[in-house]
Amino acid sequence: MLSRKVILRSIVSLGLLFGVASSTAVAQMTHEMPASEKSSRTEFQPIEQPLAIKGAVTVGGLALIGLELWWFLLSKPKSQTAQANNGIQEVSITVDGGYEPSRVVVNANQPVRLNFLRRDSSSCLAEIKLPDFHIAQDLPLNKVTAIEFTPGNPGTYTFTCGMNMFRGVIEVQSAELSEERQMAVPMKKFDRQG
């Protein structure tokens, strides 16, 4: 799947291409025109563009609108379930133009350690905030920063960058729900064999 940077660069390139293609209009000159030309000119003149350019701009605009709708409404964030390591649920999150994974699933009433590795040098992603857990932590560039907390109640909690532009979600499940899911997996395998 294409990364967000590649898609963003493609959108900018298409915008520049369409901007250059549609800028063939000739600007009006500010100097005095001969009297014979003044009478034939009106204040506004339509600028005729070839039909191919009009079609290309329309198709390009519709494609960009469709891409934005998919990007913000239909694309699903990557999710990862925390793995238990010495009694602590642990997940590694890469910070590079956003958070990957942007959705983390953990169990309630068990310690959680989120290991953030920041690779993006933008100042927006230099800080991570977990407002529901009263945590704000600086993320040094190219270093792993561990943030530990224990979620008490099941629910959905957000974490954001320092400017609240990039977001991620921590989904806290009750221990009973996660045990039911683990028990359901072997049952499905058994049903397929038998």
Image (cartoon, rainbow, N blue to C red):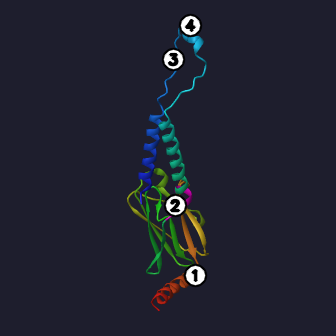
Q: What is the C-alpha distance between the residues marked 3 and 1?
A: 74 Å
Discs 4, 1 touching: Cβ within 8 Å:
no
Residue 137 position (above or below residue 43): below
Residue beneath disc 4 = 35
Quadrant of the rendering where the N terminus is positioned: bottom left
Q: Position of residue 66 (x, y in %)?
A: 53, 52
Given the image, on which type of amino acid does mark 3 rest? Met
Residue beneath disc 1 = 177
Discs 3, 2 touching: Cβ within 8 Å:
no
Q: Position of residue 122 (x, y in %)?
A: 45, 51
Q: What is the C-alpha distance between the residues marked 4 and 1?
A: 86 Å
Q: Earlier in the sequence, mark 4 or mark 1?
A: 4
Residue beneath disc 2 = 75
- Residue at the location (42% across, 54% down)? 120
Q: Earlier in the sequence, mark 3 or mark 2?
A: 3
Q: What is the C-alpha distance between the residues marked 1 and 2?
A: 26 Å
Q: Earlier in the sequence, mark 2 or mark 4?
A: 4
Give whichever of 61, 100 is nearer the camera.
61
Q: What is the C-alpha distance between the residues marked 4 and 3?
A: 15 Å
The residue tagged with tag 1: helix, strand or loop?
A: helix
Residue beneath disc 3 = 29
Residue 77 position (above or below residue 15): below
Q: Per the image, is 84 magenta?
A: no
> In the picture provided, is 180 more to the left or to the right than 87?
right
Q: Earlier in the sequence, mark 3 or mark 1?
A: 3
